[in-house]
């Protein structure tokens, strides 16, 4: 019996994610959106691609939540995307009501599900879903670091003219301007990045990574990134459903790890069938630790705006 994944939001990220999961065939997909006909049309189109891609996964679109019942994973992509000149911080109150509502519906019909947050501002929305669902932190986490490290890995591979598969990057912290890249723990074919590029070049690549989402928003003009975010989220879904135990950077609620308590922030975790099965604590320098704590405080300020207490 195939697993069941609900994707809330049939926009670019949600639809691309649903397509990636459906094509791989390991889970049936329910695509939910408030726009009448949109998820139904996209779902039917994906379903009809099955004979070509070799997938027997079922894909349905709906405007209600009854069809989502008993989902193994619920991915929340719904929300207003960033517009040119808009920071992730600007999104918090706009998307708060949307995420609160869809989380309530998801939990009502799938009380045993795992929630993966994709809506921005990612860290704050993850904490909101955790608060609303009252799930343990192992079952509510966000997609952030996989996308950020993918961008970092891409830029490094381009600079060195090597395969991106051989680049392993380390980025911690909030998904946004305060993310913390750790070049000394970033390797290319097991060789530290710091031995391959001068500090000035590394700093330049880090800066481009931090602004990576904004760069795409500026180019698209009417939307934001969706291919890479969808690929990153699918990797998380697959690691959970196949119990892969992948070590992946995700946004998770910290309760003393890294000296941070009571806020969601991006750190390496082990993702398996039970969700976040372990939080990996890296040995950071004082400077790196301070940067991570500053990033966590930036997220905390966003959370305060939502007045969750």
Image (spheres, rainbow, N blue to C red):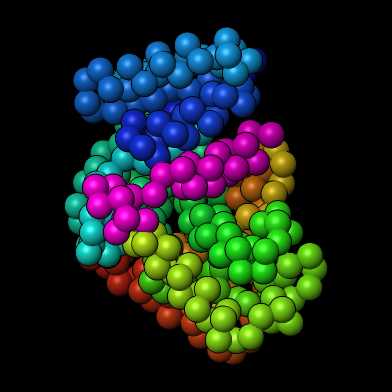
Q: Specify the farthest residue to the front.
A: 161
Question: In the image, residue 166 lies at what x, y percent?
Answer: 74, 59
Is residue 270 visible in this depiction of the protein? yes
Magenta region includes residue 239:
yes
Magenta region includes residue 39:
no
Q: What are the residue bounds of the magenta stretch?
A: 216-242
Q: In this rendering, would 254 be left or right of 302?
A: right
Which residue sits at x=38%, y=76%?
297
Vertical comparison of 34 with 252: above or below: above
Question: In the image, residue 104 lies at what x, y percent?
Answer: 32, 37
Q: Nearer the viewer, residue 163 or 269?
A: 163
Q: Considering the image in quadrants, where does the N terminus appear?
A: top right
Quadrant of res 13 = top left
Question: In the image, residue 155 lies at what x, y percent?
Answer: 56, 65
Quadrant of res 236 = top right
Q: Nearer the viewer, residue 147 or 295?
A: 147
Q: Specify the farthest residue to the bottom.
A: 286
């Amino acid at each position: 019996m195939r697993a069941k994944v609900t994707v809330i939001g049939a926009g670019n990220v949600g639809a691309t994610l649903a397509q990636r999961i459906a094509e791989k065939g390991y889970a049936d997909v329910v695509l939910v959106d408030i726009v009448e006909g949109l998820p139904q049309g996209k779902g039917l189109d994906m379903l009809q691609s099955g004979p070509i891609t070799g997938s027997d996964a079922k894909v349905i679109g709906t405007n209600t939540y009854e069809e989502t019942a008993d989902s193994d994973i619920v991915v929340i992509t719904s929300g207003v995307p960033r517009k040119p000149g808009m920071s992730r911080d600007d999104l918090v109150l706009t998307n708060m009501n949307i995420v609160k509502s869809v989380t309530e519906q998801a939990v009502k019909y799938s009380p045993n599900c795992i929630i993966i947050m994709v809506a921005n501002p990612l860290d704050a929305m993850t904490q909101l879903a955790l608060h609303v669902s009252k799930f343990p932190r192992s079952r509510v986490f966000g997609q952030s670091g996989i996308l950020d490290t993918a961008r970092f890995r891409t830029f490094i591979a381009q600079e060195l003219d090597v395969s991106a598969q051989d680049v392993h990057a380390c980025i911690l912290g909030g998904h946004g301007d305060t993310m913390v890249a750790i070049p000394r723990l970033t390797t290319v074919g097991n060789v530290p990045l710091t031995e391959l590029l001068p500090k000035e070049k590394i700093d330049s690549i880090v800066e481009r990574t931090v602004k990576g989402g904004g760069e795409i928003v500026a180019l698209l003009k009417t939307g934001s990134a969706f291919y890479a975010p969808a690929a990153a989220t699918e990797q998380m879904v697959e690691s959970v459903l196949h119990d892969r135990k992948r070590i992946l950077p995700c946004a998770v609620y910290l309760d003393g790890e890294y000296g941070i308590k009571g806020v969601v922030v991006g750190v390496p975790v082990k993702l398996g069938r039970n969700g976040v099965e372990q939080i990996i604590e890296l040995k950071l320098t004082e400077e790196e630790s301070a940067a991570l704590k500053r990033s966590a405080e930036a997220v905390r300020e966003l959370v305060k705006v939502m007045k969750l207490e």
